[in-house]
Amino acid sequence: MENYEVILALILGAFVCLFGYKLKKIVFFIAWFLIGYTLMSRFMPFINQSVPAIAESSLWQFILPIAGGLLLSLLGFSIEKLCVGLLAFFTTLAVAVNQFGVSGEVIGIACILGVILGAVAVNMIKPATIIITAIAGSYVMTDAIIALFPGSLARGSVLALLVLAGIALVGAIFQFSNTKHYV
């Protein structure tokens, strides 16, 4: 990751961590766009094989993943509760894999915990949105900090987990104190 990407990730992570609830439409749009873009990018080899004319066109190679991202992000606006539930699930999965590695047990436990937290998030949408965005922003910031200081902080270490939790706690407290009627 280049230095400017790390600084940009740090800034965007701070905005999501501190203002995630107030910027939830933008945060949800970006999250759904990235998921749709990634999914469409994964389907491109199949599409290219099925429709050779698309495979030959660099314009289609550029447009289709973006269209997939936009389509899914527009869908995400209309189903906010599903968005909050899925963000809780995927944030749980991302933090677990980042901290404990990729193994069957970690993914299984993270998926079960993610489903439980996703269901709770749907039932308590405002406070859940605050907590999820604080954790997601903290996750991005912690990765940026690890990239800035690779020798002193290692991904998956207890110190990295404490940094992530500390930033998330500060972000959640800040958001709760600046959001009226959060429950």
Image (spheres, grey):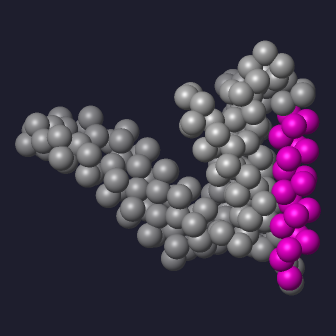
Residue 12's place in the image compared with 163, above or below, is: below
Q: Position of residue 97 (x, y in %)?
A: 70, 32
Residue name at image x 73 percent, y 69 percent: 21
Considering the image in quadrants, where does the C terminus appear? bottom right
Residue name at image x 49 percent, y 51 percent: 35
Q: Is residue 33 magenta?
A: no
What range is drawn magenta here? 161-180
Can I make out residue 83 in this image?
A: yes
Q: Residue furthest top?
A: 151
Residue 127's place in the image compared with 14, above or below, is: below
Residue name at image x 83 percent, y 19 percent: 152
Q: In this image, 7 relative to 109: left or right? A: left
Residue name at image x 25 percent, y 38 percent: 46
Q: Position of residue 132 (x, y in %)?
A: 75, 58
Q: Residue furthest bottom?
A: 181
Q: Nearer the viewer, residue 9 or 51?
A: 9
